[in-house]
Amino acid sequence: MGVTRGAVSQWLKRARVEGVEEGLRVHPASGRPPKLTPEQRAQLPALLDRGAEAYGFRGQVWTCKRVGAVIRRTFGVTYDPSHIARLLHRLGYSVQRPVERAMQRDQAAIGGWWEQRWPALKKRRPTRTGASSG
């Protein structure tokens, strides 16, 4: 069956202790208990709906780092940013990534560069003439 002796030993022990039917039933892995209680998790949408600026952040964008800071301040619990993304997804939120641009950005100058300068700099694909160079 492709299982270890240890697994078979555990199955037999459970069958003896709990009975064959209950002992051999599939048991979901317990895993680590959640850091936030279900009640705390239920409070998160209300906290996030207040907006990022309500917690002293500049702009209304919620990043994983910002959500993590709010969770740490409110509940005293720390999470890795990658887990915060999964937590937000389960709550129906999407992760936001701020667009970082210079304050002195000149959109008209950028557009002109793309229209005039970029075509001259862009590498052109060599055309095949059909003649072999070897």
Image (spheres, rainbow, N blue to C red):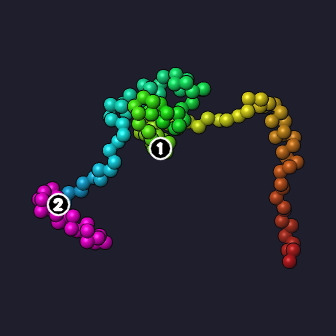
Looking at the picture, how far across and down is residue 73, in whole percent?
45, 30
Instruction: Using the image as rendered, state which of residue 101 and residue 78 is in the foreground.
Output: 78
The amino acid type of the residue labelled 2 equals Arg
Q: Which mark is residue 80?
A: 1
Secondary structure under tag 2 reads helix
Instruction: Using the image as rendered, state which of residue 65 and residue 78 is in the foreground.
Output: 78
Asked if the stretch drawn in magenta spans residue 15, the answer is yes
Looking at the picture, how far across and down is residue 56, in whole percent?
55, 24
Q: Which residue is mark 2?
A: 14
What residue is rendered at 82% in x and 40% in y? Answer: 114
Asked if the stretch drawn in magenta spans residue 97, the answer is no
Task: Give the number of marks.
Answer: 2
Q: Is residue 129 left or right of residue 102?
A: right
| Among the two numbered marks 2 and 1 on one chain, the one whose residue lies closer to the N terminus | 2
Q: Is residue 17 left or right of residue 113?
A: left
Magenta part mainly helix, strand or loop?
helix
- What residue range appears in magenta? 1-23
Quick check: 15 above or below 81? below
The amino acid type of the residue labelled 1 equals Asp
What residue is rendered at 44% in x and 26% in y? Answer: 47
Instruction: Using the image as rendered, state which of residue 129 and residue 46 is in the foreground.
Output: 46
Q: Could you tell me if the residues under marks 2 and 1 are in contact, i.e. CB atoms within 8 Å?
A: no
